[in-house]
Image (cartoon, helix red, strand yellow):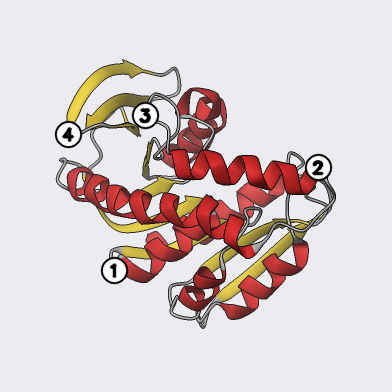
Amino acid sequence: MHVTSEKRLDDGVLEREFTLGEVPGILWTPVSEPSAEVPLILLGHPPLGLDKMYPRLAARARQAVADGFAAATIELPGSGVRPRMAVIDEARADMRRAMAAGEPVADDIVDRLVLPLVDQAVPEWQAALDALLALPGIGGPVGYSGGVISIGVRLAVVEPRVSAAVLFAGSLVPRAVFDEARRVTVPLHVLLQWDDEGNDRQASLDLFDAFGSVEKSLHANMGGHAGVPQSAGEGAARFLARHLK
């Protein structure tokens, strides 16, 4: 891990940008060194680029640090400054054509859109986790919070260091991910916007039903994709504090 910039924010948070190979990322920790290692929250996000997502990610990270955690995120494959992924770009164009024509998005399109992203992103998250947990002041347990939900599902299945996850419903989900969901056993807190214009609500409910976790809860709020109430974030924070501290 190579730190490329470092700055102190105005609320006692140290923000460090880093690269891990070709993958950029951001780490947020307390400015003052804690008396003991703090748990780590991995902040998931949609593949829109860290520059575009930064305000929301930074707000979530500041809250995480205030709650006694470190927080980190990485740029997803094909996003931001990283090289485009042709297979995903082609699938996205096919998806938009289907939606514009009022047609359902075929399973083949969903697979091509999501599975290559998951296959590349999850090992990168694991490599980032190796590097982050090697830093002084950061320890387990580890939580995952955010989207893409298919990345969160895969990570919860293959990464034993992830002890709990907050998942954001809203992305198209391949059938293969439903099969993986049955193998998820960590505690889950799933957020759903009931009127999300880009989400298949029934698919979200079916995925929640498929999760194999003994402890799982679904928190649905009225409104569209951008209408997540502040109380939803507060509830997710309490869930992570309960399981990671």
- Callout 4 secondary element: loop
Q: State the residue at coordinates (20%, 42%).
A: 137
Query: Is 242 above or below relative to 95?
Result: below
The picture places residue 68, in percent across and down from the top left corner, at 39, 45
Label 3 and label 4: CA atoms lie apart by 17 Å
Amino acid identity at mark 4: Met
68 is higher (above) or lower (below) than 210 = above
Task: Report whether 62 appears left or right of 136.
Answer: right
Question: Separation of disc 2 and disc 1 at Cα?
Answer: 41 Å
Say which residue label 3 marks.
82
What residue type is disc 3 on? Arg
Q: Nearer the viewer, mark 3 or mark 4?
A: 3
Q: Between residue 239 and residue 42, name the one nearer to us.
A: 42
Return the disc, 3 or 4, that comes first in the chain's sequence: 4
Q: Earlier in the sequence, mark 3 or mark 1?
A: 3
Residue with the mark numbered 4: 1
Left or right, residue 9 beside residue 95 = left
Going from N to C along the chain, the mark reached first, 2 or 1, is: 2
Determine whether 156 is above or below 213 in the image.
above
Q: How far apart are marks 4 and 2 (CA)?
A: 43 Å
Judging by the rendered image, the residue that carries numbered circle 1 is 160
Mark pair 3, 2: CA separation:
28 Å
Residue 210 at least partly seen: yes
- Whole-number angstrom distance, CA of label 3 to CA of label 1: 28 Å
Please name which of the two marks, 3 or 1, marks the residue nearer to the observer. Answer: 3
Res. 100 mark: 2
* Disc 1 residue type (three-letter): Pro
| Res. 241 visible in picture | no
Provide the secondary structure element on which disc 3 rests: loop
